[in-house]
Image (tube, helix red, strand yellow):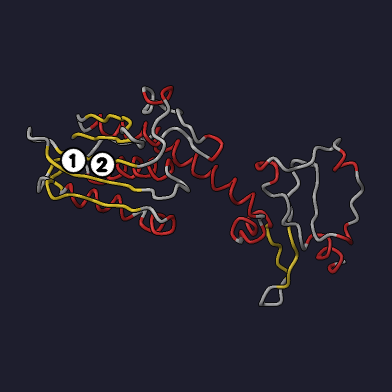
Amino acid sequence: MTNNCSHRTRGAIVLCLATLAGCGSAPNSPAAAAPVVEADSEFLTSSDNWFRPVEARTGPDGALWIVDMYRYVIEHSRWIPQNLQDELDVLIRMSQTFTEFARLPAPHLQECDPRAVAAGALSLYQPRIAESGVRATLDDREAPASMRADPEQLGRALKNVIQNALDAMDGAAGAALEIAVLGDGAGKTVFRVRDTGPGFPPEVLGRAFEPYVTTRRDRGGTGLGLAIARRIVSEHGGSITAGNVAGGGAVITITV
């Protein structure tokens, strides 16, 4: 009996995330109608919403262990097909972005180095930049030595802007990312991020910082990255603008 139980459930890795991924078969669909010979498959499925796949194993101490296959799949993602992993990554990223947008705390203002803020934001994307062949430069020669801001939140705003630029240039040959940090002559600090992508479409340019506005929805875009950046900058009493560059590309300017 033990062996039979193990055989019937040993692969019940199955479909723990099938409903989320939209790949489960409805009971009346052709796929569900076809009889399943369990001996021919190590996967066990059920149309019962309360079904919880488990596996019986012999533990190191010789005792019988009952393994929760839901957790086993999540903690050992090799069992999840790559296309489902990609979809789950999108869902996780969307969830994190929605949470960040909804729970953004008030900035904790302090004296900080704007050069370090910009360098830290750019460093997060260095592996992606190196892999994609983007030429990235940071010019902080005219940056003020200090500014009053929340370095973590301001860095988050810059990261979102940089990610938006890299997404816009994804796969483009000769792509370049230029970041400049300088003073505005009136005691404020300016962060300027310029890319060589296609620029903002006319119908998007005026709404670039509105929540849920995106040109990448089919590739996992949430339309919240720039909205979060604007909210952070506004909480600092600053401004953020977007524009297109003659000859191609876009530029986003943060002034705090």
| Marks 2 & 1, CB-CB < 8 Å contact | yes
Vertical comparison of 38 with 230: above or below: below
Where residue 197 appears, x then y in whole percent? 40, 40
Q: Quadrant of residue 26?
A: top right
Q: CA distance from mark 2 to mark 1?
A: 7 Å
Mark closer to the chain start, 2 or 1: 1
Residue that carries the numbered disc 1 in the rendered image: 149
Q: Is residue 79 left or right of residue 37?
A: left
Quarter of the picture containing the C terminus is top left
Mark 1 residue element: strand
Residue lying furthest bottom: 61
Q: Is residue 95 left or right of residue 72?
A: left
Q: Which mark is residue 159?
A: none
Where residue 235 appears, x then y in whole percent? 24, 31
Where residue 140 appears, x then y in whole percent? 17, 49
Residue that carries the numbered disc 2 in the rendered image: 154
Q: Residue at x 48, y 48 (%)?
A: 171
Q: Is residue 93 left or right of residue 81?
A: left
Q: Nearer the viewer, residue 100 or 113?
A: 113
Q: Amino acid at mark 1?
A: Ala
Mark 2 residue element: helix
Q: Residue at x 45, y 28 (%)?
A: 213
Q: Quadrant of residue 54?
A: bottom right
Vertical comparison of 119 with 215: above or below: below
Vertical comparison of 42 with 182: above or below: below
Q: Residue at x 70, y 67 (%)?
A: 65
Q: Amino acid at mark 2?
A: Leu
Where residue 237 appears, x then y in whole percent? 19, 29
